[in-house]
Each structure stands twice: as structure tokens, then as C-alpha cells.
Amino acid sequence: MSKEDNKKKIIIMGMENAGKSTIVKYLKISNYEIPENPPDMNPTNKVERTVLADKNLIIWDFGGQEVYRNEYLEKPESYFHSVSYFYYVIDVQDYYRLFSSAMYFMAIYNVISKYSLDARIVLLFHKWDPEFDPKKKNLKEKFLEKVQPYLEKRNTAYLMFDTSIFSPNTIKSAFNIDLIKTNIGL
């Protein structure tokens, strides 16, 4: 039995530039300081794995570029077995990709529900940054209008968090596995 057998597998997915890798970067740093500006990050190529030994987690950070999104859906058996937690990141400031993001979420959910029936679903409405005004374009509400009926039809429980790198506790809360277990169940 390998050391990784006891770890929980988390996958973090979403469209390109949604902030997935920045979230993972934050989770790896114990004494995170609030940045003045978002960090420059290179796009993730395919999948990057990060082990958080202190939390007993393996995070699979999936690149969100279209070429990779298609690959994940074409070869799901390579990616979606034994998923404990499925985090889907929605950029609340990206109006132009909202519909594509909702469609991608539903496609991935279909695959995950086949390969990891017990995976817990967590939606992160990310980039809820200090200058963001949700009254101008409430993309969270629009995303939920698309996916909630789909999830309710399948009787799927899920949690949602509004997150920002400028508010570190929002990310910490979203990755508090005990909280997730309590609110979604084992």
C-alpha cells in the first residue's frame, strides 16, 4: 500500500484563467500574505499534482485550456477515478465564458458521477475581489440558473463559496475538509 492510498483526491477544475492554480499556490503556503495585485501565473499544462501532507490531500489542478478540457472528457478513465472532492472554479468576473463554464461543469459532473459516485461537489465563485461589484453583473446567480436545475434533477448535494486571494480565509474555509464532510455528508 502506497502512502498516497490514504490521501483524499481533490480535483480542481474550471475554465482557463479562473484562478485554479493561484488557489493551489495559496494552499501550499502556510503564512500567506494578502497580495497587492494578483500574482503572475503561467497556465497549467494538463494536470499538476500537489500533495498537502499536513491535510492528507492530493490536489489535481487541471489546466483549463480548451485542448486539455477536451482531452479530459475524451479519456476520463485517466483522471476521474477515486475522486473525493470535485472543486469547480467559476471566475465571477468573466461574463464572456459563463455559458461555456456552465456547460463544461455539467460535462465534467457527468463523467465524475460515473467514475467517482461519492465525490463531493464544491463550487468556488472566485475573484470576489475588493473592487468587484456583484450588482453590476451577478455571474454567480446566472451560473446557478444554468446548473442548479441540472444538479437538483440528479439529487446532488453541493456547497458554494465566494473566494478571493485578497481574502485568504475564504479559500481556507472552502478547503476545510471537515466542514465539507459535515455539510455534504460522508
Image (tube, grey):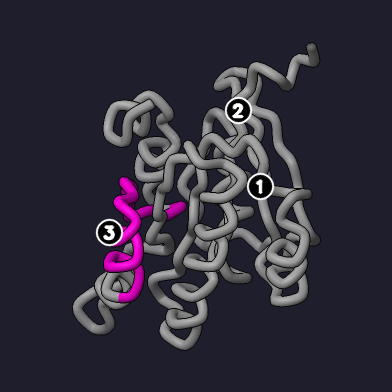
Residue that sits furthest to the left in the current view: 135
- Residue that label 1 marks: 80
Q: Residue at x 29, y 65 (%)?
A: 148
Q: Which secondary structure, mark 2? A: strand
Q: Residues within 10 Å of mark 2 (few under 14, many from 20)?
A: some
- Disc number lying in front (1 or 2): 1
Region in magenta = 146-165
Q: Which mark is residue 152?
A: 3
Q: Nearer the viewer, residue 163 or 81?
A: 81
Label 3, label 2: how many angstroms apart (C-alpha)?
28 Å
Dot 3 amino acid type? Glu
Q: How crowded is mark 3: few (under 14 residues within 10 Å), some or many (20 or more)?
A: few
Quadrant for the N terminus, please: top right
Q: Which mark is residue 57?
A: 2
Q: Height in image: 145 above or below 99?
A: above
In screen coordinates, is 146 left or right of 81? left
Percent of width and height locating residue 116: 57, 41
Q: Which secondary structure, mark 3? A: helix
Label 1, label 2: how many angstroms apart (C-alpha)?
16 Å
Mark toward the start of the polypeptide (3 vs 2): 2
Q: Does the magenta stretch include residue 147?
A: yes
Can you tell which quarter of the image residue 81 is in? top right
Can you tell which quarter of the image residue 68 is in? bottom right
Label 1, label 3: how many angstroms apart (C-alpha)?
22 Å
Q: Which mark is residue 138?
A: none
Percent of width and height locating residue 72: 72, 62
Can you tell which quarter of the image residue 153 is in? bottom left
